[in-house]
Amino acid sequence: MANLAETQTTEGVPVANDDIPQAIRIAAERVSVFYGEKQALFDVDLDIASHSVTSLIGPSGCGKSTFLRCLNRMNDTIEGCRVAGNIKLDGVEILSDALDVVQLRARVGMVFQKPNPFPKSIADNITYAPRIHGLATTKADFDAIVERSLRRAGLWDEVKDRLDEPGTGLSGGQQQRLCIARAIAVQPEVILMDEPCSALDPIATARIEELIDELRQEYTIVIVTHSMQQAARVSQKTAFFHLGILVEEGETEQIFTAPRDERTQDYITGRFG
Amino acid sequence: MDKGHIVTSFDAELARLTGLITQMGELAVAQIDGSVRALVRHDTKLAKKVVADDAEIDALEAEVDRAALNLMALRQPMADDLRRALAAMKIAPDIERIGDYAKNIAKRTVALDQAPVTTPIVTIPRMAQMVREMVRDVMQAFADHDIELARKVWERDVEIDESYDAVFRELLTHMMEDPRRITSCTHLLFTAKNIERIGDLATNIAERIHFQVTGDFIDEDRPKHDLSSVMVVEPREAGAGNG
């Protein structure tokens, strides 16, 4: 027992710890969204921590996807949609008209509910965005991007011998991982996921969830999910939306074991009538 | 939490879990009553019944485990529902232990009946009455999600500790006065200790109710007053005509 103290001091090496407060990657302040006359989101304040997974949960129509789509200006594509407030990515306002939206979407990638690979080869799916953004020129560089992206998405071993085959020929779970590989090919800082597993079976879902957990070492992830178990499993922070209002946000453990707001409690325990 | 779940069978399963715990609690109170009545009245027959009836509490505990396990596996309870399932799984063994202590008191009643010399039982029934009320109240607090009542039970344990100290002193004095009473006094000492432990378990349950309802632990140290572990009674104190 004499060297107990010694052991403790030598083990005091700094390690990644979920308890340590993390840097804020995205800071949203008083964000409101209007579809024409109708207001869909009301004064949302939410900080998204770097290198963590934040889940947005809530019943259909609560505004969670609307909020997610603000983070890479996807709402710009909807006619009559207006976004008010401030959203800062690493301190820079992204709602500004002066911002290059194409550049923003390279930094803030997105994965959708239904896997949507391009009708091209697996390799071309990965190289498409780096080519547009001029991230590589030589074939060797592109090959490196393909391998690195597919490896990070946990798909490399399954597809390395058929990179020229169409991406649409893969299984649903593989297609979704291909879409994740495609999103990370341009080295984004943030990955937005809008119900990425709702079209997948439980095994494919588990693989995506495992992947999400690995990806948060390098990226900041925001995920919209209808599965509360999924939010509980994959995220460190959870935000609950209801009727366009951010009702409660906090550590995932706290939200699912002892929520503060009665509306959160009613929703996650299945008491909404 | 009177608002029902969308899936009503979930409510039924939670209610069943709560019902099992309540049933265990009622049985435990009856067992305490029976064991102490048997002790006071030297009723060996009743004591034997108490010993036999303990199996009912044990069976209910197993049923609570099964019901809670099924609830977790099939319903994936969250928030207060999850805390409720967890509380049931933690309270059930506490009540089962209470039953064991009552059973042990009953066993000693049978043994006391065969002891050479009896000892007057004065403080123990009063102490048992207090503990019985604690168990009854804590079960009421459980049924009503009443953290105020749970806290009151929690605070009352100090009185049990004080009573236990008094019994300890009383029995030591008896033993010094008449060594033939050592057998009966030793059994009574264990009986008092059993009652004191039941009080501790009632306070445990009070703490679990607090966590179940609020999601927070009671954040103070429980008042304690059990001095028996350091208590010495001098022979002089027992002897008469010394002062």
Image (cartoon, coloured by chain):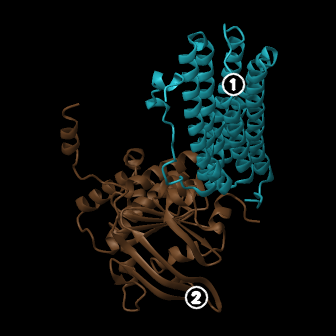
Q: Position of residue B90 (x, y in %)?
A: 61, 39
Q: Position of residue A87 (x, y in %)?
A: 43, 82
Chain for numbered disc 2: A
Name which residue type carries label 2: Glu
Relative to B178, does residue A116 appear above or below in the rendering? below
Chain for numbered disc 1: B
Identified at 50% across, 59% down, the residue is A252
The answer, for residue B127, to whether it is visible in the render is yes
Camera-nearest label, 2 or 1: 1
Which quarter of the picture shows residue B106? top right
Task: Say which quadrant the N terminus of chain B sits in.
Answer: bottom right
Between the residue at mark 2 and the residue at mark 1, the CA separation in whole angstroms equals 87 Å
Q: Is residue B180 left or right of residue A213?
A: right
Q: Is residue B186 left or right of residue A235?
A: right
Question: A49 and B21: which one is in front?
Answer: B21
Q: Which residue is mark 2?
A: A79
Image colour for chain B is cyan
Q: Position of residue A48 (x, y in %)?
A: 42, 70
User: Do badges 2 and 1 share one subunit?
Assistant: no
Q: Position of residue B7 (x, y in %)?
A: 77, 54
Q: Is residue B13 left or right of residue B189?
A: right
Q: Which residue is mark 1?
A: B121
The answer, for residue A166, to whether it is visible in the render is no
Q: Report helix, strand or loop for mark 2.
A: loop
Question: B146 and B4: which one is in front?
Answer: B146
Name which residue type carries label 1: Ile
Relative to B60, does residue A58 appear above or below in the rendering? below
Which quarter of the picture shows residue B56? top right
Chain letter for the part of the structure drawn in brown:
A
